[in-house]
Image: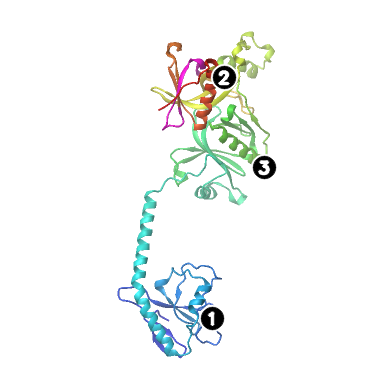
Amino acid sequence: VGPGHVRSRSHDLVHLSARKKKSSNYMYLVPSPSPRSASGRSSACTLDSGGEEEESLPTATGVVQDGWVLCDSSASGDNKRTRSSREGQRSGKATSSASGSEHRHGNRRAGSKRNSSGSDKGSASKRGSNRSSSDSGRLQCSPVVPYKEEDPSYIHHSFNLFLDMEVFNTGMGERFTMVFKSGMVQYGSSEEILCLFVASNLTAYIYQVTAPESPKPKKWLKLLKSHPLRKLVYLDIGPGYQTLRAEFNPPDACYTFLLRDQEKCERCASKLSFVAADVSHSSFKRIHVDTFHLEHIMHPERVLKKTVLMKLDNLSPRQLPSQLLPDDKRESECVTLYLLAHRHVPRKGPVAVSVVVTDHTLFLGEEHFHHWPLPRLHPLPDQHSLTPPFSHVKQQEISDIEQLALDHDQHCHLVVKFFKDNIVEGDPLCFMLIMETPGAVKALVSALQGPWEKQFGVPLKVSHK
């Protein structure tokens, strides 16, 4: 039956054209889902949704005749009335004469024409607003960041879909468990690589980040290596909870992730150790927290020689030469803070450094994570290729600090200025440091203020620019 006609009970064709000039709205018919009356008499429309609001249902304007319901297309999508309200509005509309039915159809036709122009305007304005909002959404679209620094268990649904479709073996029940982004140094290579570590319940994936994040992972990620999680043997948390090292065997592989944040390191280590221990036939043994030995940054060459004799020549500590034994009382100082940061060097830019604070001294040094600490499973290099734990070490007495300078715009920047009279020729007048988080800046300021104020009895000056 076409949109312009309806077949009545008496089989007379009644013209019900509701089409208005220059309007696309019309009256149309749909089958009645559940007629209320089995006798075939006109009854109320029975489009029922259980009393809940309905979206995009046509408004029933007519009565049931031979199982058909007359509906108005101009109101389609705007009907949000409940079952009770519809029944109340429909009560008293049923009649027993065909002429009365025709009269009602004519009235509704006129009402439909009167409302069609308003409906067209409303629909046009809605379509225009939808187009404008979608256009602005496309203009303001930002790259999808598939991870959260504060939650290694979080993954964006689009990235999770990429993993399921392109990476994981879903047929084996492989599913996502954790992800984090950090710098990474592989044992034997001195280059720090920005990586994304992704772990499923079966495998660990190490991706190199080659470009800024975007909705298409293949454009900014390059798979470097993958290892079955059952082959993860050791996890080592570095001093100050700044690094996380993972050792796999076999094949022998060792990765140090430079997280540079204590809370992030704790969360990632806890999650990864739980996932590794939960794998069937797991080789995971334990998680270990390393302590920092001040000798490594004060006498890195001596540490190297002692290590070569003990690890490569199999000498015991009692067999070491006396010149390799600790003789400096300062080595017994308590390390109050250990942080990983970057130091801005003129004409060179940011350089990765380790910041070590004791009761009296501030140390900065470039730490060689590609060799230290020595791995348990990986074969050791020969004595000629093994490097000392630190190089380019700078140290200044905390009492030589003149003031600390913070930047309002750069919350992770800190400048440590020294008195000129106490600076040895060739040493810098200040350390320009870039931390990973504002919390690391506060920790360093607090670690320097305590010994300084204890010695001078006045607060250490902290300026803001």
Q: Are marks 3 and 2 in contact (CB under 8 Å)?
A: no
Which residue corresponds to the image point at 62% horizontal and 50% vertical from the top-left?
Answer: 173
Q: Are marks 1 and 3 in contact (CB under 8 Å)?
A: no
Range of magenta residues: 392-413
Mark 3 belongs to which amino acid?
Asp
The residue lying toward the viewer, choosing from 155 and 189, is 155
Residue 405: within the magenta?
yes
Which quarter shows the C terminus? Answer: top left
| Residue underneath mark 2 | 358
| Residue underneath mark 1 | 35
Q: Is residue 123 above or below residue 87?
A: above
| Residue underneath mark 3 | 278
Q: Is residue 95 above or below residue 354?
A: below
Mark 2 belongs to which amino acid?
Thr
Residue 10: percent from left, percent from top: 46, 91
Query: How many numbered discs sit on the rendered protein?
Result: 3
Q: Earlier in the sequence, mark 1 or mark 3?
A: 1
Residue 220: percent from left, percent from top: 45, 41
Q: Is residue 269 visible?
A: yes
- Residue 425 quadrant: top left
Mark 3 Cα-neighbour bin, 10 Å: few <14, some 14–19, many ≥20: some
Mark 1 residue element: loop
Q: Nearer the viewer, mark 2 or mark 1?
A: 2
- Residue 417 quadrant: top left
Q: Earlier in the sequence, mark 2 or mark 1?
A: 1
The mark found on residue 362 in the picture is none
Real-space Cα separation, disc 2 to disc 1, in angstroms: 87 Å
